[in-house]
Image: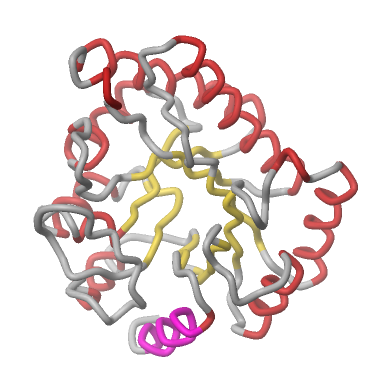
Amino acid sequence: MNLGISLLPNFLDISSIESFFNFAQEMAVQTVELITEPPWCCLAELSPEKRKHIKDLAKERGLSLTVHSCFSDINIAALNPTIRSACLDIVKSSIAFSAEIGAKVVTIHPGAFGANGIAFPEKTKIYNFKAVQELAAFSAKKKIQLGYENFPIVPWQLFDESFKPKEIQEFVERINNNALGITWDVGHSNTTNIPMEEFFKHFKNHLVNIHLHDNKGGGEGWLDQHLAVGEGTTPWEKFFDLMSTIDYQKALILELNSKKKIISSIDYLQRFL
């Protein structure tokens, strides 16, 4: 296992991607995850020269790269075919960007029902399946590993295969493409009231990436708080006990929006790593 940090869009106590890479080097982490969202990594604003610069900076600092695809305003399961096609193109641009900068893993979000999709749930779920199927095929051509991320419990209605571990496993296995795996967001799973052992059981053979952050646990409403690790109710000792039973060699990404939270989390995790 190697530890990494994520450059979230709302990470504001830095001045540039380069300064974030410098901070990663100071923290002695091995991986940086770039989220292809403004302000730090807006693909529309990254020229070929800037993309090469990112790749060179990471190499100079001995950092591996992963990518989290765009998610703001994105719904790959949208009922509107024009919107759905545009969203797929945007996610594909994140996958192509990953290949350019030498990243090997891209995390994507599942689709959601949306305002109109709730009225046509089965059709919307089919669109989600076909979208991920298409993205997995595109990733395979680019030699990129795609991680389908589990969602937290949120105020709008979700597909079962966006937050329930058994359904996510079955969804990934039905697509049956070696380029598609699972990004386990441990903070997200803590909001569901589903035991951690269930997530581990259904995810362990498909893991390509893991996100770490904390929250106060399950309940109603938006609880995806992204607290520092150890400041919520996530059973971290249980998580690491479970992970010790498999040979997971990929990244553990701290998905936090400040240096203070990252420093606190790394200090907390020393007892397990």
Q: Is residue 8 above or below residue 153?
A: below
x and y percentages locating residue 112 in the rendered image: 31, 30
Question: Looking at the image, which residue is at 36% across and 30% down?
Answer: 111
- Res. 31 image quadrant: bottom right
Instruction: Magenta stretch: give its range.
Output: 260-270
Q: Nearer the viewer, residue 205 or 98?
A: 98
Left or right placement of residue 79 versus residue 57 in this view: left
Counting labels gives 0
Left or right placement of residue 237 versus residue 1 in this view: left
x and y percentages locating residue 173 in the rendered image: 31, 28
Q: Nearer the viewer, residue 102 or 67?
A: 67
Identity of the residue furthest to the front in this view = 115
Q: Is residue 105 above or below residue 110?
A: below
Q: Is residue 135 above or below residue 239?
A: above
x and y percentages locating residue 199 in the rendered image: 20, 51
Q: Nearer the viewer, residue 93 or 268?
A: 93
Q: Is residue 254 magenta?
A: no
Question: Looking at the image, which residue is at 50% across and 26% down?
Answer: 136
